């Protein structure tokens, strides 16, 4: 058939090494143009969708001289076999690449593209290095599923995984003809807050047990083990890399995975015209990749030409257009929200210099809430040495709300006394930040273990407290000795950011015990590794004391850069 002036072959079979048949739709090749390279997407949502919630339709890519192949993965859509998320994507992807390279009209060179699960299928296939695969463009995904997807903050990402599990289970129920289960899953997807409040997480989800039991593997393996090692495609990829265009969003829940993959690769080998990688981070959520997020309009340039960039990327590697300027451009490009413009850099910073410490300081007033006495000081000697420790109480039955990593106003939340708030002085000049803030907190815990959740916000002159970054660490695992709660040091790497903090604004750090549902609720009194088994009766109360004296210093290290953009 023909659609959008492009010839389409539908439900084309691909037989895998074990005899299972997968099906794909093929767009193109363009008539009269001779053999052309192939862009392959492998996805679990029904191949008609083809990542069009974020990417241009396959017709658009085909019109630019590519044969586009969109394939249902094993056990999804029309494809045969049993769907076990991620488990078969390396071998199946290898076979699919080899098959696509041999299709009539293909010139034998293959690239892969797509986002989220479709991005993970790229890393999986590339880890086995099929010869026809010349380049990939994974967007908003992870190559290391444990650190970059399921446990990005050191605890299970229940907000990202549980509603998504119901989405995958819904399609499994539809495939099985179970209309009642499909409807139940649809209702769960429409009310993610309801299923996220339902405890315990490891029980009470019979439809997941039937249609997506892999969810319980993800949630039930809080430590990195051989299961997760098999789903870490980054390490084998690093041994035999191919060019990768990494695309992420500052507000995407998979941003840690995107940056982890690029940061690991950027220092492995010197850039050359025959092998280089690129990182692109826009002001986007997972869906959509638009100009507005968290109530902020990032302007008409928020798109950043990301669709054209992908075509240029594949033109370079698959069509041999080595003079299209791609190699000469800085390898890192990201959107900075204050100036509402794209910045460029030669690398993604990984803590090499540029850090500036500010110190938490108490005062004669407790630091609880925005009206309290918590301050951020530029110099350690400026910290109030007479201040008593600041204390917050965390009741796991009433977790502190934090819906997402969007740059939303947190000022109302900061009035609560369950939060310690430390505010810096208004900036005299612009402060450019790019990278991951690091926090070191001296603390005591009563009735732990519990969580220490850190949130960094930017106080604007009008009173808005815009969310910048968040992170967590478990504290209080050691029991008191002789009835004395010992001091310990909590080290937290906060979520990556990029922002020019304008003159007149001020940085503000919050410390509390939860950030739900963005972060898994710590039940208190038991390790976070058992949180998935905690029911309502297991939720307890913990208290945390934070030291902010010169001899027990707590500090925040900011990733300050002298020049964020290539002038």
Image: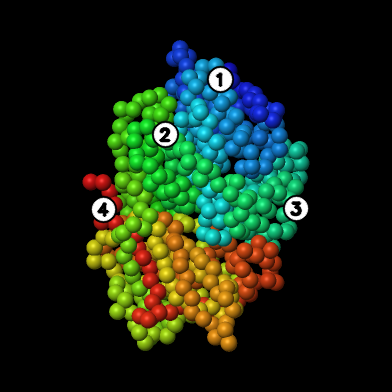
Question: Can you tell which of label 1 and label 3 is closer to the viewer?
Answer: 1
Residues under numbered marks 1 and 3 in contact, where contact means CB atoms less than 8 Å apart:
no
Residue at image position (53%, 72%) is 475
The earlier-in-sequence mark between 4 and 2 is 2
Which residue is label 2 attached to?
310
In this rendering, the answer to whether 107 lies above or below 120 is above
The earlier-in-sequence mark between 1 and 3 is 1
Which residue is label 4 attached to?
563
Question: Can you say which quadrant of the picture contains the N terminus?
Answer: top right
- Mark 4 lies on a secondary structure that is loop
Alpha carbons under labels 2 and 1: distance apart: 23 Å
Residue at image position (37%, 81%) is 551
The earlier-in-sequence mark between 2 and 3 is 3
Which residue is label 3 attached to?
206
- Mark 1 lies on a secondary structure that is loop
Label 2 Cα neighbours within 10 Å, binned few <14 / some 14-19 / many ≥20: some
Which residue is label 1 attached to?
103
């Amino acid at each position: 058939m023909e659609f959008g002036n492009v010839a389409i072959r539908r439900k084309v079979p691909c037989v895998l090494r074990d005899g299972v048949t997968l099906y794909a739709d093929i767009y193109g090749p363009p008539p009269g143009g001779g053999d052309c390279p192939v862009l392959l997407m492998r996805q679990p949502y029904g191949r008609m969708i083809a990542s069009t919630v974020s990417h241009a339709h396959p017709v658009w890519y085909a019109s630019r001289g590519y044969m586009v192949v969109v394939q249902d993965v094993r056990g999804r859509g029309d494809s045969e076999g049993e769907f076990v998320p991620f488990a078969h994507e390396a071998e199946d992807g290898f076979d699919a690449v080899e098959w696509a390279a041999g299709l009539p009209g293909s010139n034998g060179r293959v690239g892969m593209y797509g986002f989220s699960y479709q991005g993970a299928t790229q890393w999986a296939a590339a880890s086995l290095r099929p010869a026809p695969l010349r380049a990939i463009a994974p967007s908003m995904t992870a190559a290391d599923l444990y650190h970059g997807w399921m446990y990005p903050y050191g605890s299970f990402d229940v907000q990202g995984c549980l509603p998504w599990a119901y989405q995958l289970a819904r399609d499994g129920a539809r495939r099985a003809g179970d209309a009642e289960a499909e409807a139940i899953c649809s209702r769960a997807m429409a009310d993610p807050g309801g299923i996220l409040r339902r405890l315990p997480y490891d029980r009470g989800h019979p439809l997941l047990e039937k249609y997506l039991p892999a969810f319980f593997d993800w949630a039930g393996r809080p430590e990195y083990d051989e299961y997760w090692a098999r789903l870490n495609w980054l390490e084998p990829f690093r041994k035999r890399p191919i060019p990768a265009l990494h695309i992420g969003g500052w507000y995407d829940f998979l941003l840690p995975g995107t940056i982890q993959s690029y940061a690991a690769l950027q220092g492995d080998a010197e850039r050359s015209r025959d092998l280089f990688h690129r990182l692109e981070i826009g002001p986007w959520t997972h869906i959509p990749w638009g100009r507005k997020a968290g109530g902020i309009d990032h302007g008409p340039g928020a798109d950043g030409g990301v669709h054209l960039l992908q075509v240029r990327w594949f033109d370079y590697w698959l069509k041999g257009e080595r003079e299209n300027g791609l190699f000469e451009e800085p390898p890192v490009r990201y959107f900075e929200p204050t100036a509402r413009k794209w910045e460029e850099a030669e690398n993604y910073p990984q803590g090499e210099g540029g850090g500036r410490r500010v110190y938490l300081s108490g005062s004669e007033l407790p630091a609880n809430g925005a009206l309290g006495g918590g301050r951020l000081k530029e110099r350690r000697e400026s910290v109030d040495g007479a201040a008593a420790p600041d204390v917050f109480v965390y009741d796991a039955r009433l977790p502190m709300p934090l819906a997402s990593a969007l740059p939303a106003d947190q000022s109302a939340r900061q009035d609560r006394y369950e939060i310690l708030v430390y505010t810096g002085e208004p900036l005299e000049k612009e402060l450019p930040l790019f990278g991951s803030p690091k926090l070191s907190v001296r603390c005591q815990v009563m009735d732990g273990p519990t969580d220490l959740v850190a949130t960094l916000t930017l106080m604007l002159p009008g009173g808005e407290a815009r969310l910048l970054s968040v992170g967590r660490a478990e504290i209080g695992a050691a029991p008191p000795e002789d009835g004395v709660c010992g001091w310990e040091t909590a080290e937290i790497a906060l979520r990556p950011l990029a922002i020019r903090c304008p003159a007149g604004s001020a940085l503000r750090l919050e410390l509390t015990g939860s950030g739900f549902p963005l972060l898994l609720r710590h039940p208190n009194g038991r390790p976070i590794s058992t949180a998935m088994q905690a029911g309502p009766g297991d939720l307890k109360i913990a208290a945390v004391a934070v030291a902010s004296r010169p001899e027990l210093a707590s500090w925040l290290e900011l990733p300050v850069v002298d020049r964020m953009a290539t002038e």
